[in-house]
Amino acid sequence: MSLQGIVHIAQQTMQRFLTPGDIVVDATVGAGYDTSFLAKSVGPKGHVYGFDVQEEALTRATDTLLKADLMDRVTLFNAGHETMADHLPPETHGLIKAVSFNLGYLPASDSPVTTLAETSLAAIETAMKLLHRRGVISIAIYGGHPQGQIEQKRLKAWAAGVSYDEFRIASYEFTNKARNQETLLLMERARPQTRG
């Protein structure tokens, strides 16, 4: 037994929120691994909407999904995650059970494209508005490259300022990892307190 990395913790957490038939968003499709996980989690009656600005990523993701026979429950958009409200069907707004962000760059690619703090923050704030009242947002941030370090610092500072009465935000990271620090932020809408 050992402590788990942030991807494993993110998936374990999202799975606790998801049931077959749910609607979810992969805000950073990449090679499609998180998309596949989400598609399996929501089952054949659920649906995954995925976003990525790189055609290479969507091509790789489509291949991954086709091999796993999951493409029939996934819709991919060649668009930035900050535009998700414009692309998602209006009837899904307020019903999204999970939004997954895996920030950084496309693994095993020569592309210099990375996510940026400004557009990631805009996307997260949009996801908060689209989220089901019992939904979850998972944000994996990788500080192993200069833009990732900026994004990590900005998002952690932003998270600290979100009202606890509106959203609960938990952070997971290896505190003593000196290089390539990874941070996982998990968010859920605060539920009204009942008096007993």
Image (spheres, rainbow, N blue to C red):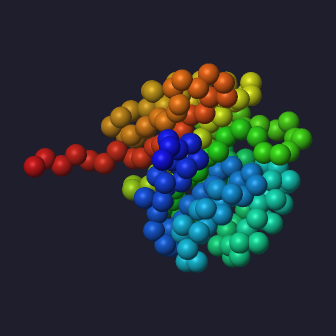
Residue 50 falls left or right of residue 94: right
Classify 147 as above or below 112. Answer: above
How far from the left and from the top, in percent, is residue 156? 53, 28
Residue 192 horizontal/vertical position (percent) = 26, 47
Q: Residue at x 78, y 45 (%)?
A: 107
Left or right of 21? Residue 7 is right
Tell me where residue 92 appears, x and y as whole percent: 54, 64
Residue located 67% across and 68% down the image: 74
Camera sees residue 21:
yes
Q: Nearer the viewer, residue 31 or 5?
A: 5
Q: In terms of depth relative to the viewer, which is nearer, 72 or 66?
A: 66
- Above or below, 140 against 150 in this view is below
Q: Is residue 156 above or below residue 38?
A: above
Q: Is residue 185 visible?
A: no
Q: Is residue 104 above or below residue 66?
A: above
Residue 149 in the image, given as x and y percentages of width and height: 67, 25
Image point 62% across, 22% down: which residue?
A: 178
Q: Residue at x 56, y 34 (%)?
A: 183
Q: Residue furthest right?
A: 110
Q: Residue furthest front?
A: 1
Q: Quadrant of residue 16 in the image?
A: bottom left
Q: Is residue 36 left or right of residue 158?
A: right
Q: How many marks?
A: 0
